[in-house]
Amino acid sequence: MSRQQGPVRADQEVQWRRCGACGAFVYVKRLDRNRKVCPECRFHFRIPPHTRIEQLADADSFRSFPDDHRPRDLLKFTDSKPYPDRLRDAQARTGRQDALVAGEMTIEGRRLVVAAVDFGFMGGSMGAVVGEGIAAAARHALSRRLPLLLIAASGGARMQEGALSLMQMAKTAQWVARLREARLPVINLNTDPTFGGVSASFAMLGDVILAEPGSLIGFAGPQVIRNTIRQELPAGFQSAEFLLEHGMIDAVVPRENQREHLARLLTLLGPSVPELPEVGGAEPLTEPPPAVRGTRDTVALARNIGRPTTEEYIGHVFDDFVSLHGDRVFGDDQALTGGIARLGGRNVVVLGHQKGHDTQALVRSNFGMPNPEGYRKALRLMRLADRFGLPVVAFIDTPGAFPGIGAEERGQSLAIAECILELSRLRVPVVSVVTGEGGSGGALALGVANSVLMLENAYYSVISPEGCSTILFGTADRAGQAADALRLTAGDLLRLGVVDAIVPEPPDGAHTAPYPTALNVKTALVRTLGPLLDLPGDRLVELRRERFDRFGHPERQPIVDWEKRDDH
């Protein structure tokens, strides 16, 4: 028999909150333990800045900047109530002068500056105080040489401050630009909601842009769009997942993973330890090995569906890797992968063509043939590498750039040309590895390097053997003859000076032993990168220019006596 309980005091009452997504009632203490994420459907409740900072920062590490800048009613603005009354209400509710919390903190020992917008203060709208607070945080980051984390939750510019609020978009953007010029990382974490003048300024300008699951992010809010153009919006429109798919952000990161994700980014964008790792793979070859198979068989091996992909090489070769996504214009092309990685103590930017081992993966990656947005993603990563002084490692494995109608409409030639141009001017070491197919300009877009390595059974050519045969002989049936004539094997290209070294493969091809092959790639990268790391940026650019100037030069182009070759 249970004992009769006495009256329940108010502070003993069980508290529940209803999830706005699935409708489930969740015990508040359980919700708190779960970082204000619904345990039933993973819906992320809105949280105030101090709660978010507690979740991200090392214990007792946050030191806030002074909160003594009061907003002013310079316009004498009144709607249903005067602006000063709205301010007093928001100040009483939140305990702060305006909608920004800023300060210094550490995440897993990494110091940074943080500025977080509070949606609970007039919808997180950006007026003069918020704009000045973000600018002040950027100035502090600049003076201390620290990264800046910008956390947004805002309806946009503050209407009650009129054009003065509009000016904050330029003010905050120019301070992000100043940090870019100083090569200091800026990371955005956009939460629900992030709209208007905030999304169109500092919230979408970071070197890396993260978002919480389900967050609505955009310029004009859904209601404004419906009322303005009378257009019905598709499901999921303006969600974080929608932005990831359309190339606008780098990752959707659940709340429980944000601290770890930020810590890895801060490490990979921070100072490197100079040492490269000790490796035990086979040394790269600087003389052509005796051929064990004909050109046609080499092409077939390069195209083998089981051959390791770029993502698999990344997993085997590098000690850590954070994937970055999107071209910030149109989409996130799955045929081009990339991000920031760690090779021993050295931070690097990695990018490469991506294929797959089955039909589903091949279709998703468009068979390794990038659209313009893939090359523009690569371009963004190249510029990030240059800004932070990170060497570039590029993996080449593509039949060629995608030749579709949409690709032409969106500027395929320009996207490839911009990649070639950008690689030629990067003031950091660039090493490219041809791992499978090296098809035409779509391959060269990642191949303008200080040193080019090539796997033993890869090929690299101005055109596919089938394309060459079709153009010259009117049929693809003579592709084998065309392959021989194109001199596209690793040995041929080493003789011509197009590649600098050959990475050995197992006797039956890389797909038969992916990890040992990757270890050989790692060894070649370490041996190649080492000497380049000691060179100044101007010299790296000069050497790259000299490398490509020699092709076709009457005195510097290597001449090969193909009759004396021992591998055919």
Image (cartoon, helix red, strand yellow):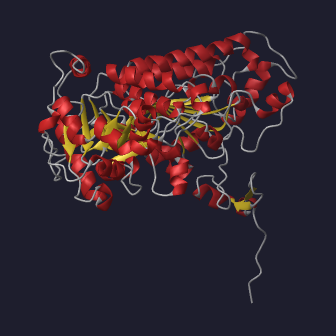
Give coordinates of residue 343: x percent, y percent: 27, 43
Quadrant in the picture for residue 534 = top left
Give coordinates of residue 373: x percent, y percent: 53, 32
Please count the marks in the image.
Answer: 0
Do we see residue 529 in this rendering?
no
Residue 381 shown left or right of residue 16 in the figure: left
> Which residue in the rendered view is the most extreme toward the bottom?
1
Quadrant in the picture for residue 305 = bottom left
Q: Residue at x 25, y 20 (%)?
A: 537
Give coordinates of residue 265: x percent, y percent: 41, 40
Frontmost residue, 480 versus 316? 480
Give coordinates of residue 488: x percent, y percent: 29, 38
Residue 3 shown left or right of residue 130 in the figure: right
Frontmost residue, 295 versus 370? 295
Q: Which residue is drawn at 28% across and 58% down?
A: 515
Residue 337, compared with residue 87, is above or below; it is below
Do we see residue 89 in this rendering?
yes
Q: Residue at x 78, y 57 (%)?
A: 23
Quadrant in the picture for residue 18 = bottom right
Residue 358, compared with residue 493, is above or below; it is below
Frontmost residue, 110 versus 331? 331
Q: Which part of the image, by quadrant, shows the N terminus?
A: bottom right
